[in-house]
Image (cartoon, rainbow, N blue to C red):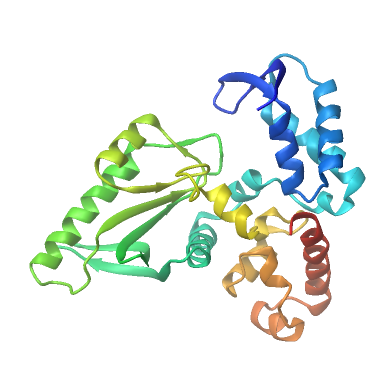
Amino acid sequence: MNILGGFVTKADGSRQLFGIEKVVRTCLRMGASSHVAYEIAEKVESRLYDGISTQMILRMIFRFMRNYKPEVGHLFDLRKGLSLMNPKPEFELFVQVLLMHNGFEVRPNQILRGKCVEHEVDAIARKDGVTFFVEAKHHLSYHALTGLDESRIARAVLEDVTEGFMLGRTDLKIDRAMIVTNTRYSDHAKVYGNCRDILQIGWSSPENLGLQNMIEAKRLYPLSCLRGLGSETRMKLVESGIVLIGQLLGENLYELAKKTRLSQDALRDIVEKARSTSNAVW
């Protein structure tokens, strides 16, 4: 990576040298040409000061990108969009849809019978012969870390449902636990998760299966990334099963109005905004 002068302050407070290639990659993901991406990166570099936050750099990227793609102005950045979600049911549904688009067979909102008690889980997911129970953990602040407690609870649930299966109280065998969060995991959580074979999906981990990678690879951007879409309106769409911007593009307005109890005029505006942003990120 081409490392240039100036230190950047990350969300966790740590500092690292500014790298122009990170800015270029962000611009490319937003639909910029290679020429435009490097032009914006040079503009950002020229405005650097020691200790600048990564959030401030992202704001500059959005500001400059709007000169080339005005439709970018309709979008929040992905991490902020995810943080704006309601934990239930929006983030849970989004996780289920994301897993389905990444090769998992998903059964949402299940009750698992253990040796001691029943456990309500956000989903059962199966892939390559392995069956997971899924817990979706949402944080309003994407700077927050997902800690050890979630992993310890997941381990306890797995032990109880495994013993329940061995005793014949259920015919569903669960092989592993999966936790999906919109943030990163604490160091203790990662060590424990690795030791206990818990699949911990976070913002950027594990490699090729992190939230950012799964979303950007298949353009599965959530509705919460769409600026100007109020939470009440968004929840009506979520309750009708729509959590992705891309899902809006194939909807019949008349049928969607019946399902959501939103006017066709309001939906038409939302769909047009979604269509214009699709040109920016698709």
Q: Is residue 19 above or below residue 189?
A: above
Residue 56 placement, left or right of 241: right
- Image coordinates for residue 251, horizontal then vertical, percent: 71, 79
- Image coordinates for residue 43, horizontal then vertical, percent: 86, 28
Q: Residue at x 17, y 63 (%)?
A: 114
Q: Nearer the viewer, residue 88 or 179?
A: 179
The answer, for residue 241, to whether it is visible in the render is yes
- Where the N terminus falls, by quadrant? top right
- Image coordinates for residue 111, horizontal then vertical, percent: 29, 69
Q: Nearer the viewer, residue 264 or 203?
A: 203
Q: Is residue 268 above or below residue 178?
A: below
Q: Nearer the viewer, residue 266 or 7?
A: 7
Q: Residue at x 83, y 62 (%)?
A: 276
Q: Residue at x 52, y 61 (%)?
A: 98
Q: Is residue 177 above or below residue 64?
A: below
- Where the C terminus falls, by quadrant? bottom right
Q: Residue at x 65, y 49 (%)?
A: 81
Residue 24 placement, left or right of 213: right
